[in-house]
Amino acid sequence: MGTYACIDIGGTAIKYGCANKTGRLFDTGSMPSEAVQGAGEIIHKVIGIVQTFQVKYDIVGIAISTAGIVHSQTGEILYAGDHFPGYTGLKLAHIIEEACGLPCTVENDVNAAGLGEYWLGAGRGASSLCCLTVGTGIGGCLITNGKLWHGASNSAGEIGYMLTGGPGTLEEQASVTALLRMIAERKGLAVESIDGKRVFQWICDGDEIAIEGMDCLIHRLAIGIADICYVFNPELIVVGGGIMAQADYICPRLTAALREVLLPYVFQHTRVVAAALQNHAGMLGALYYFLQTRSGHMGTGHIH
């Protein structure tokens, strides 16, 4: 059985591992992405990872998940922010294929995370789902019958840019960044001096400002999710990202907030669950996408 190199490129780190077609990951690790040094640095690191795996295993394909808007069919980076200089317009899949002599697919990181959850995580068995990542920003993807909905410009699911009637975008209202800013302003602190862990410690200690800040974030997030439900009507909402380190606190409150803003009939047919795969979701989803598009067969099975 062949082995697949799976790589997840983020602004801070590049995660990597090998997997078989059932999604069993092994030989995993990570390294700093140093994305600010330019696209060439990322390419150099990815090629090095793959070539190291090629020495050790029978690698038959390369599955990449990456930040940025991706042309899923060609593997070109259509758009990336300023913290990825030289990334926009990069024909990433082609470059890696040429360097390593193997087929390569590239998918957006949030799309890949959603596919991973659909295949082997919290989304198993769902006919349709929306996967959200809530962290520094907010990302999302839409999946129906196991297929991503990419949209006309490969930018479907950019949920963080939704305008929900409040000040700014959903990301500016309901990300962890927004939460820290709200709480820091009310406490008269520099936002750089607090983080999510400290906020949750305050919540555990009964701090009213922290509790009210989190309640506000959850309410705003519920409004954004309600808009998604009215348009896409997914069976399942899978929520991941940094905020879900406290899933036991977040999920029941988010479900309750969603009950308040959705029509009862729609709410009865919508479930909110926490993502299950954590740091492996992007790699596994990238592999699932590779198997969907390049190998003519689907992997089945569970993580071991």
Image: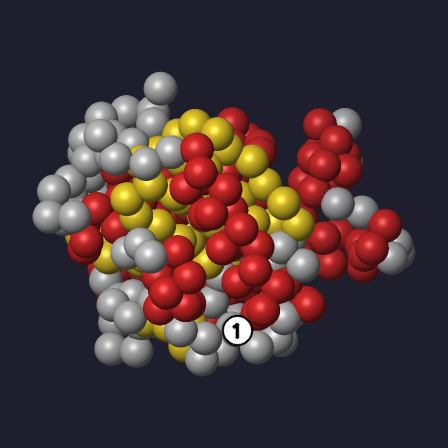
Total labels: the figure holds 1
Viewer-proximal residue among 302 and 100: 100
Q: Quadrant of the N terminus?
A: top left
Report whether residue 227 is seen: no
Q: Quadrant of the C terminus?
A: top left
Dot 1: within a 10 Å radius of its alpha carbon, few (fewer than 14), some, or many (20 or more) residues? many
| Residue 202 as seen in the image, left or right of residue 97 | right
| Residue 255 as seen in the image, left or right of residue 123 | right
Residue appearing at x 72%, y 53% in the figure: 180
Residue 140 vs 122, above or below: the answer is below
Circle 1 residue: 87
Give the percent coordinates (x, y) of residue 270. 26, 43
Colour setting: secondary structure
Give the percent coordinates (x, y) of residue 139. 46, 58
Residue appearing at x 62%, y 55% in the figure: 33
Report whether residue 90 is seen: yes
Residue appearing at x 49%, y 78% in the figure: 88
Viewer-proximal residue among 64 and 121: 64
Give the percent coordinates (x, y) of residue 170. 51, 65
Give the percent coordinates (x, y) of residue 209. 75, 45
Residue 175 vs 81, above or below: the answer is above
Residue 81 vs 226, above or below: the answer is below
Label 1 secondary element: loop
Residue appearing at x 32%, y 36% in the figure: 58
Residue 280 vs 24, above or below: the answer is below
Q: What residue type is disc 1 on?
A: Tyr
Judged from this view, the residue extending furthest toward the left is: 296
